[in-house]
Image: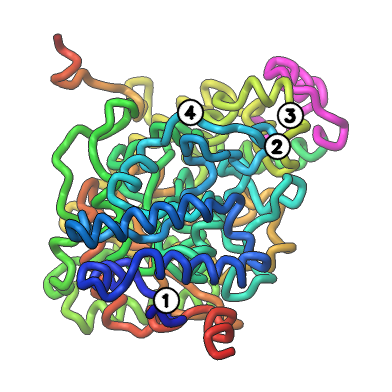
Amino acid sequence: MVSEQILTIAEAARLIAKKELSPVELTRTCLDRIHALDNQLHAFIHLTEDRALAEARAAEAAIVAHGPKGPLHGIPIGLKDIVDTKGIRTTCQSRILADNIPEADAACAERLAAAGTVLMGKTTTHEFADGGPSFDVPWPPARNPWNPDHFTAGSSSGTGAGVAAGLILGGIGTDTGGSIRGPAALCGIAGIKPTYGLVSRAGVAPAAFSLDHIGPMAWTAEDCALMLQALAGHDPGDPASANRTVSDYTAQLGGGVKGLKIGVIHHFHEVDYRVSPGTKRGIDDAIATFRSLGAEIREVQLSPLQDWGACGSLISMVERAAAYEEWARTRLGDFSERVQRRLMLGALVSGVDYVQAVRRRRELRAELQTAMKDLDVVLTAAQPAEAARIDEVPVWDTFATPSFTMPFNVAGYPAISICSGFGEGGLPVAMQLVGKPFQEPTVFRIADAFEKATEFRNRRPALITARAAA
Amino acid sequence: MPSEISDAALDFLLARAGLSLTPTQKEDLRSIYPALADMAARVRQPRGRMAEPAHVYEFAEEDLW
């Protein structure tokens, strides 16, 4: 019998393998939570309840007959609503695609389905994975489970909220400048933007082609590793897809951090932009934890955070404007006000500005490569502060605060956000751990060691625990 | 990129992009233009004409048939 305790993917997989947990029971428990909580959280834009129960029953039958095909078999997940799903409405949270029903699954959806996951539905996003929160699209923005008056960050907002609240055990996010790591940070979960090209973008609505990444979001780094194992791999359908052998993403888990070298980019979060006291305390405590576990801590100096942001933002504005040019010209008023603003920006960036940004990108990536030569990961903030109130998010947030996540979209390096504590009002704070290209196993190893050495994974949002107590 | 943009320049750029904006939207864009100009300045470094962009490419083995 499933209790109100929310399981991680790894825990559920172990119970399913021992036939102590039924995928149908697990799916029903998640559906119960969705029915009880999603009217406050709006994590789902479209629930696929009948399909979920059918998939759960099929998973159960297969597992009884043959055992699970892997750790994701029978696990309830959500897909961000910019991920194409065959026969299931995929709106990108936009009235422009309100009735869009794709004829094929995106590659990532296909891979998760092949791993035996149970699709609970399509999760809320910012419109076309762009500016949000928007209140002028047909569906409401997701709310933060730690305090529904507060923002989730975006654009993978519904997946972040859904995982934190236990509505799903994992889900897909996409990340062009931080859209996996932002919601992961503010919702207190784990989310990794893998190395550029590791997970196919085929069938996912573009935001900015050269910055777009697809990746998993879940309660723990270990769960993200389990999901990435199913997602990673070459796909000829994505011209940027890396054609290389897929690593074993759980192989290094439990290896600890003794002897590993962690570089801290202090100036990002202490000089270039001063993060909140809670965020800084979380990072400082994390550094102390890593040191106590035997890691070697070093200082890293890079170009100012704002340089990375300028480079990524200019590229993003232009690539987005190119992708959506036709609709911007003919249907601009059908976009939310926030997305209209962002699409308009593309008109003001010249072709020369764009190429200068792409030249700067090469320099910045070389700089990070040099800085990481003798390091295993680098560490900095994931977000500048705890979640703001949802009604206080600046319209031009791109310019209001520099992005701590964009540098690693510019570089294409793998970066995970994990919870590093709680700040004012009990809202989560987070840090990023950034690895070398295709070194996700090391990133997971270090993130997992931190999660297991601290207590932050034992705490869930109050609205969940209050429901459990009732 | 100058840090301010004239009405005529803004109208030209919007017309070239095929965007039809309201006066309020144009004012909104004008208000953010200095921040955009700062970004454009930041990506310009003393690098000389030979510095390559990130988007150059090479042929992979499977391209060579």
Q: CA distance from mark 4 to mark 2?
A: 19 Å
Task: Looking at this view, name the residue that lies furthest to the bottom.
Answer: A469
Residue A118 image position (x, y, % from top left):
40, 55
CA neighbours of label 1 inside 10 A, class few (<14), some (14 to 19), many (20+): many
Residue A300 image position (x, y, % from top left):
30, 61
Residue beneath disc 1:
A6
Quarter of the figure with the C terminus of chain A: bottom right
Q: Is residue A355 above or below residue A1?
A: above
CA neighbours of label 3 inside 10 A, class few (<14), some (14 to 19), many (20+): many
**Tag nearer the camera, 3 or 1:** 1
Q: CA distance from mark 2 to mark 3?
A: 11 Å
Residue beneath disc 3:
A332
Residue sitting nearer the eye, B45 or A368? A368
Q: Tell me the tag on residue A103.
A: 4
Three-letter amino acid code at disc 3? Leu
**Tag nearer the camera, 2 or 3:** 2
Q: CA distance from mark 4 to mark 1?
A: 34 Å
Quarter of the figure with the N terminus of chain A: bottom left
Q: Earlier in the sequence, mark 4 or mark 3?
A: 4
CA neighbours of label 4 inside 10 A, class few (<14), some (14 to 19), many (20+): few
